[in-house]
Structures are given as C-alpha cells and as structure tokens.
Image (spheres, coloured by chain):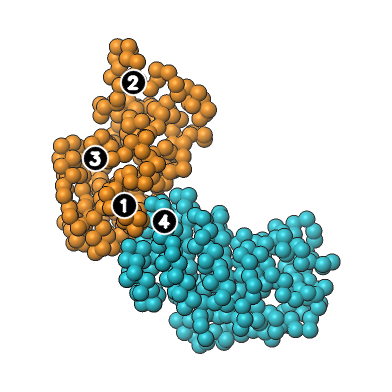
Amino acid sequence: MTTADTVSRRSGAHRAGPQDTEGRSAEPLPYGFGDLPALMARMTGDEKHGPAATSTLDALWVLYDRVLRLAPETVGRQDRDRFLLSKGHGPMAYYAVLAAKGFLDPDILASFGSYDSPLGHHPDRLLVPGAEISSGSLGHGLPLAVGSALGLRAQGLTDPAVWVLIGDAEFDEGSNHEAVAFAGSYGLDRLHVVAIDNSSATHGWRGGIASRFEAEGWSAVTVDGRDHRALYEAYTAPHPGRPHAVVARVEPKHS
Amino acid sequence: METMRERFVDVTTDLLDHDPRLALLLADISADPFAPAARRHPDRVVNVGIREQLLIGAAGGMALAGMRPIAHTFASFLVERPFEQVKLDLGHQGVGAVLVSAAGSYDWPAGGRTHMAPGDVALLDTLPGWTVHVPGHPDEAETLLRHAAADGDNPVYVRLSNHRNATARPVEPGRFLPVRRGRNGVVLAVGPMLDAVLAATEGLDVTVLYAATVRPFDAAGLRAALGERADVVLVEPYLAGTSAGQVNEALADRPHRVLGLGVPREEHRHYGSVDEHLTAYGLDAAALRERIAAFLR
C-alpha cells in the first residue's frame, strides 16, 4: 500500500475505535489501552506479541495518557512537553500509542516498513507526526534530551518537561553516561528518563540501573513496568532541583 | 600576534550579548577565555566537561528546542570523535549548528597524532548540506563566524587555525577570490595556505584563487577563473586532494587536470614546529613552487 492509498482512505468511519461496537457514534470514540494490541497488529499481523515487542507499551501509554502535556493540536507549541523515544528499536508500541492518541492516522499503521510509509522500523522525526527525534542508533536520545532541556531553560521555558525513553541494553552506550553525569551535576530538573529494563543488557547492571542515576545526583525510582498506578506515581513524584529517572522493570527478554 | 581562536572568543562573546537565540557549548577547551561570557549568560554558555558525544548531542537538542548552538573544541574531538553524533544528532534530525574547531591538522605538532585532524573536512564531505569555512586570518574568521551564526539553521563548520596569513582578504562567504591573474592554469589556495602559495607562484604566469569557504564549492568562480588551460592545483591545509572531487564535478564538461596538494594521509611521527611540519609535507613555499611549476609547465 502506498502513502497515497492510505491518505485517500483517511476520512470516514475508519477513525472509530474498536470500542465503537455498535457502529452508531458520529464522533469516534477515544482509544483505550485495550485497543493497543489491535493497533499493533495492523503493523505485524499478529495480536499475540511477545514481551520484547511490548516492553515499552505500558510505560508509553501511562505517559501519553496521563502525564505528558501534549496533544496533536499542540505539537507546534514551544511550551509543550517533549517525549523522545531513544530506544528506536521495535517502535510498534510507540506508533500504536501515537495513533491511539490522534498524532497519526491509524490507517497508516498497515504501511509499516514499506517504501512510501512514514513508519520505519526506526522512527524518523521528519516523517512521523508527533515524533520529537529520529532514533535507531542507540545512545542518542538522552544527550539530545539534555540539549532540549538546556535549550528550553535558555529561553526561560522552565515549565515544559523533557522525557526520554531508553532501554537497559541501550544503557551500555557510553554517550548515556556522559549525559547522566552532566545532567545530575548540572541539576537539570526538567529532564526525565524512563529506562525500560527487560534484562537484555549482555553484562547486566550490577546493583541496578537506578543506582547509576542516584550516584550522579538524580532522583530515581524502580517500579513494575506493567503496573499503571505505580508508573503514574513514579512519573509524577516530585524531584526538586534534580533530574528524575524511572526504571520500569518488565519480563526478561530472554526468559 | 592575534590568533583566530582569540578572535572567536571576542566575536562569540559579543554575539551572545546581542542574539538571545545563540548558545555556546564547550567541552573544557577554551572554557577559561569564555568565563566572562558564561557569567553574563549562564544558561546560554554551557561547558559539559570532557564529553564530546554529549557536546554534539546537546547541540542537536538545543537546536531542536529552537536555539542556534555553537559547539567548540579541537577538530579531533569536534568532528572525528563524535562523528556519528554529527551525522545523526544534527543532520538526521533536520537541525543545524555552528561547529567551530581549533588546532586543525598540524597546529600543535609536539602534541602528536592525537591532536591532529587532517581528515575533518573529508569526513564532513560524507554528509549532506555542510558549509565549511576555512579562514586564513582573524579578520576573515570574524566575518565568517558572524555569517555562520546568522546563517539560519544551516550546519556550518568553521575551521580555525594558528597557521595564518599576514593580511586579511575581503572574503565573501561562499565565493572564491581572484588574487593573481595568469594564463597557465589556476592554483586554488585554501585559508592559511595563501601566503605560501603567493610566494611559491611569484613570477609564474598562473592565476591564484583564494578560498576561505570550500563548501559549498564555488564552481562558478573556478570556471570563471580558467583560461584556455583547465589545469587546477589545489593547496589545502588538510588532507591532500580533499576538494579534487569538487573540481572534477565543476569541470565535468571539459578535459582537465587536477593536482591535490595538502597534508599527506600517512602518519608523520615527528614533533617540532608547524613550519617543520609544513616543510615535511611539501607545503612550504619552495616545495610548493617546485610541485606547482612542474604540473603547470
């Protein structure tokens, strides 16, 4: 399917979510968390996703649903919150959440990875509506997030939060450690990290990932990455004067 | 004698006072002379420490947030060490920055290979869209730095060196400047190489063009300078032949010859002074004269 095909099919009842079971609503119903597997299936053709494909799903959903001050109508505003997907591998969950929240047309999902699709196997910010960065090569999102937080602060925008999602294996990349040490020392308190820990780092993180952040002066908390209430509380915990890291533990990738 | 790097500090300090969109990112190098600017603009002058991946990543993030970042350190640590950040955190994100390097190819010969970056311009040539300025005098550096800071969101590299010409030329960003007219070919001198090229070509019937901007390459300026003979000698203060492909492209429609002179690819395991290295590379006036005369005879 080409992009032109998908665009031509944008209007009409396709926007309605699966919750619209009686098919009589004039306005499409909002998507819920339960709709995400079906949205992901449009990309993969399989509603039964392994844990690796969905390791980020709950963390992303709670952020977009309850924490980020960001909507399709405000993506151009300078004072919006920023979410940077650093771990660009396996972006189906991210695309599904962006579609569920109205940033991109769900009908585009089926084009995933095809020549004219805006949706690559790693996201490109120039192609994906709502994507703040292009990622794929690991270890770039956190330094970019540091710069974004610095840039907002330099413009007197002290309210917008900058969030970046990384993976525990991605954390191997040394560039992350340059960013963590600097941000902690600098007290970059509008910077937030979500580290998805599915125990996929080859040599692991003895003492836990959170300890690396704490040692550099960050506020850090480790929670069950499938527990929406725990994620929400961790995301919204106060951290005056310090950047904040939430380590979201999920099922091991190789279990 | 004033260096381009000293002028960079003065000009950037002044620009920061007048352009609120401008930010300066440092990785310890030149942090001391920028201390007054950092005191005046603590949120826009940020020293990240000896962390060059972060230097470029943070510049990309600042640009994404709407700022015009200037990032500075030695060329080895600005372009070579964080090259993937230059590729992805700037270009691939669709944002730009001004990268200002010091030390170049041979500014600190006693410092050895670790502090020499003769491949910086060739590396940037693998990426789309970069403007590359190579001034030969502090006055030219000021002109090009001011232009770069105001050059929209474009990616711009400004290559500063302690090696300099005695006098400044009236450079126009992106344009080659004819300095001497002759009939037997063109010698294109880049940045600090001009004085040696002028001495080397004294009495030779050749045209000397001066380039303080090498990317974009002023193909029209080169073509306009050619007479009957399409023979071009490049004299560049970084890897020999870096701009040969640009010359070939500019002259694709006519038979031509190109000789690329510059810093050799081979490692040169000697210390000493800049002059000793220029002599060893065949870039002093006497060696240049011999090589240019042989090619354009």
Residue carrying label 3: A67
Task: Name the spot of residue A48 as percent of width and height, x first.
Answer: 29, 28
Identity of the residue furthest to the right in this view: B228
Q: Amino acid at mark 1?
A: Leu
Q: Residues within 10 Å of mark 4 (few under 14, many from 20)?
A: many
Residue carrying label 2: A28
User: What SS does tag 1 mark?
Assistant: loop
| Mark 1 / mark 2, whichever is N-terminal | 2
Residue carrying label 1: A157
Give the side of residue A218 with respect to residue A19, left or right: left
Chain A colour is orange
Q: Do the dots labelled 1 and 3 sit on one chain?
A: yes
**Res A208 visible:** no
Residue appearing at x 32%, y 62% in the figure: B43
Task: Name the spot of residue A173 as percent of width and height, x first.
Answer: 33, 57
Q: Do the dots labelled 4 and 2 sit on one chain?
A: no
Residue appearing at x 34%, y 69% in the figure: B40
**Between marks 1 and 4, how big is the CA–CA gap?**
12 Å
Identity of the residue furthest to the front in this view: B18
> In the rendering, which numbered label is found on residue A44?
none
Q: Label 3 is found on which chain of the structure?
A: A
User: What SS does tag 3 mark?
Assistant: helix
Residue carrying label 4: B67
